[in-house]
Amino acid sequence: MEQDWILLNTYVNPNDAHVVMSMLEENGIRVVSLNKRDSSYGVFGLIELYCHVNQAHQAMDLIESSEDE
């Protein structure tokens, strides 16, 4: 992964990760997902979302505001 990227959050459910990723991208934040789920079973592991440190504050604010709804 490139330098200066920060972990925003981890998700067990791929759908949750996709919804958050889409919301961030709609707001102009470049997001990268890293799927660490086991390929054999699909129930072990997490999906991590990363963004550049320059956009981290904005991304975290959006994530927090979406969780409050």
Image (spheres, helix red, strand yellow):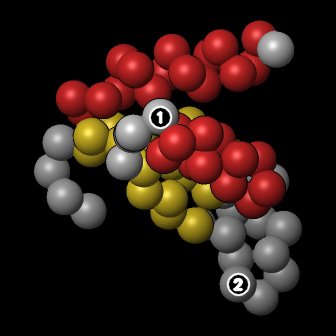
Q: Residue at x 26, y 62 (%)?
A: 1
Give residue 13's position: percent from left, percent from top: 80, 53
Residue at left 18%, top 42%? 4
Residue beneath the point at 42% across and 56% down: 32
Residue 59, compared with residue 23, is above or below; it is: above
Residue furthest to the left in view is 3
Q: How far apart, in angstroms, are the residues tagged by discs 2 and 1?
A: 31 Å
Across and down, in percent, residue 46 comes to 66, 56
Q: Residue at x 50, y 62 (%)?
A: 34
Residue 41 % position (x, y) = 83, 81
Q: Is residue 21 visible?
A: yes
Q: Which of the numbered marks, if any, corresponds to residue 39?
A: 2
Answer few, some or many: residues within 10 Å of disc 2's Cα (few below 14, many 20 plus, some between 14 and 19): few
Position above or below: 45 against 25: below
Q: Of tags 2 and 1, which is closer to the observer?
A: 1
**Residue 69 percent coordinates (x, y):** 82, 14
Question: Quick one: label 1, few (<14), some, or many (20+) residues within 10 Å?
Answer: few
In the image, residue 20 sits, relative to residue 53, either above or below, namely below
Amino acid type of the residue tagged 1 in the rendering? Asn
Look at the numbered disc 2 and give the secondary structure of its residue.
loop
| Residue 7 figure quarter | top left
Query: Disc 1 marks which residue?
Result: 27
Tags 2 and 1 in contact by the CB under 8 Å rule?
no
Amino acid type, label 2 = Ser
Residue 17 seen by the camera: no
Secondary structure state at the residue bearing disc 1: loop
- Position of 53 with respect to 57 (left or right) is left
**Is residue 38 or residue 32 the one in the foreground?**
32
